[in-house]
Image (cartoon, grey):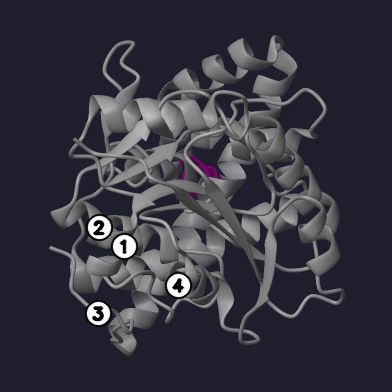
Amino acid sequence: MTVLSGISIIIPYKDQPVLLEKLLESMRANAPQLPPIEILVMDDHSKLFPDELCATWGARAIPVEYGRGPAHARNQGAVLAVYDWLLFLDSDVIVPAGFFEQIAAAIECHPELDALSFINQAYEPSDPAVRNFGAAIEHFWFTGNFAGDTCFAPIRGFTTRNGFVRKSAFEAVQGFDTAFVTNAHEDYDFGKRLSLTHTTLLCRHPLPYHRFPAALTRLIRNYWVRIGLFVPYYFVHRPVLDKTQTSPHEALLRVVGLAGMFWLLLAMLPLPGRTAWVGLSLISVMLYIAGVWRFLAMARRVSGTWRFSMLCLPIHYLSSVVIVAGGCWAACAYAIRPRRHNLRSAIH
């Protein structure tokens, strides 16, 4: 029988003291009496080293090598961890009530479990629309992995913002790939490598809060960076695609949306067949809206208003433009100069 002897909580951190304190406060409020936990805050050269803040909440602040990124910080935390289970949390997460109890329940129900990830919140009324869009679209993608009302679902991945993993499994796949120095794609790569040989599950509830970008420019940048890393990674390693987030259906939806704009631009040019271009544009737009309708309906349901749902539509469309354009750019760059990420093992 699997025993949860203790949890080492590892938090990569840089210059977000208010958010870190909220996270530490939520863990103190919701941490179980048993098993014991340790909290390691891996500081990447913050302006103010958070040792006093961490000590207040029973955590250890540990400096890491400058500029190596969150993957390196997490790996260093895992080396120092004293317990057999690791919980990775981002500093902009808030742990909900019942979180640790659900981890224990998952291990009891699934003794073969090696890793568990949680879905984030669907909507937070106090957050701005762009931040809530990020939360809602990820919540929508992740819930697509579940069948019916089941609490746990298999997933070929891992969420570093709130992921729980057996230390021996983490070490077996040699942790995160430090070739990824930004907070993008290191989670995707780790989850694919881990799920090849270990049991990885996704948990429906409770819902940890995650603070998504509030600025549209930051959200767009995140999409651009991620697609730029994903495309060459896919060409080299051919990972099994997710059921939702990187599925062929999702990719086709983004292309169809962009096609509507393309046909409309053609219709505005002094070329023959303008009526046909307008028709194709309308068809593309209708197909795009039909494809995104389930997400918009979920956004309406969780927010209680169609206003937020209608705000999600142009943000979703803009993200489609960025994803398709970034994907084409990355594919062309790879074709001109093929390159391999410095990964320890190929994903098949």
- Percent coordinates x, y for residue 15 in the rendering: 80, 67
Mark 3 and mark 2: Cα distance apart in space: 12 Å
In the rendered image, which residue does mark 1 sit on?
170
The answer to whether one can see residue 288 in this image is no
In the rendered image, which residue does mark 2 sit on?
194
> Quick one: label 3 or label 1, which is nearer the N terminus?
1
Q: Assign the C terminus to one quadrant of the image.
A: bottom left
Q: Who's the residue at 49% across and 49% down the image?
A: 262
Mark 2 and mark 1: Cα distance apart in space: 8 Å
The residue segment tinted magenta is: 260-264
Q: Is residue 264 above or below residue 194?
A: above
In the rendered image, which residue does mark 4 sit on?
75
Q: Who's the residue at 78% across and 22% down the image?
A: 125
Amino acid type for the residue under numbered disc 3: Arg
Per the image, label 3 sits on a secondary structure element best described as: loop
Q: Who's the residue at 29% across and 84% down the image?
A: 340
